[in-house]
Image (tube, rainbow, N blue to C red):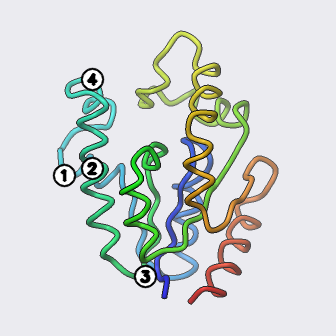
Amino acid sequence: MKKNIVLIGYMGTGKSTIGKILSKELKMEFIDTDLLIEKNIKMSIKDIFENFGEKYFRDLESKIAKEVSKLNNKIISTGGGIVLRDENINNLKKTGMVVLLKANADTIYERVSKNSDRPLLNVENPKEKINKMLIERKLNYERFKDIEIETDNKTVNEIFEIIKENYFKTV
């Protein structure tokens, strides 16, 4: 039986926002894997990338994914790159319904452009980088999802209702 709701998708697709609403409405604890990493290392994601590099961060992310996959009745919001390693999603999928939240590159750029704590977007042309990364990660997102929701033109409540309806079909 699947008890967790695991939110995957690129940055800026609404994972944290939707996760907090799901947590409140379904009375399930909210866990953000990026925040867990920051808490454990006592550094921001941006600082981890700058000081230790992406591979080190991905290793930490894998460790956290394995730990949270052992939990039940949680809303788990993952970092956008968690799908880069099969082991992460395979672990999370064992105890959870995996929800892919999607948005187009323009929407994502609009949502994240004011946030300088996005290390992968600290480049000359962030919109181009978003497009490139969406293409690179598309197959991984697609093959792990149980359900997929386009968030561009949906309200938070509409997204919540879709997830809730699908979740209660699986438990």
Total numbered circles: 4
Which residue is situated farthest in the top direction here?
Answer: 124
Q: Where 17 sits versus 158, above or below?
A: above
Residue at image x 55%, y 59%? 144
Mark 3 surroundings: few (<14), some (14-19) or many (≥20) residues within 10 A: some
Which residue is situated farthest in the right direction here?
Answer: 153
Residue 47 in the figure: left or right of residue 167: left
Work out whether residue 51 or residue 157 is closer to the camera in this orientation and state it.
51
Work out whether residue 166 or residue 26 is closer to the camera in this orientation and state it.
166
Q: Where 115 sits versus 149, above or below?
A: above
Q: Dots 4 and 2: beta carbons under 8 Å?
A: no
Figure quadrant of residue 21:
bottom right
SS assignment at label 3: loop
Hey, what amino acid is under mark 4? Glu
Mark 2 surroundings: few (<14), some (14-19) or many (≥20) residues within 10 A: some
From the top left corner, tell me how far across and down residue 94 is, in percent. 42, 74
**Numbered label attached to residue 31:** none
Q: Which badge, 3 or 1, is on the more N-terminal residue?
A: 1
Mark 1 lies on residue: 40
Q: Dots 1 and 2: beta carbons under 8 Å?
A: yes
Residue at image x 63%, y 19%? 128
Work out whether residue 46 or residue 83 is closer to the camera in this orientation and state it.
83
Hey, what amino acid is under mark 1? Asn
**Numbered label attached to residue 73:** 3
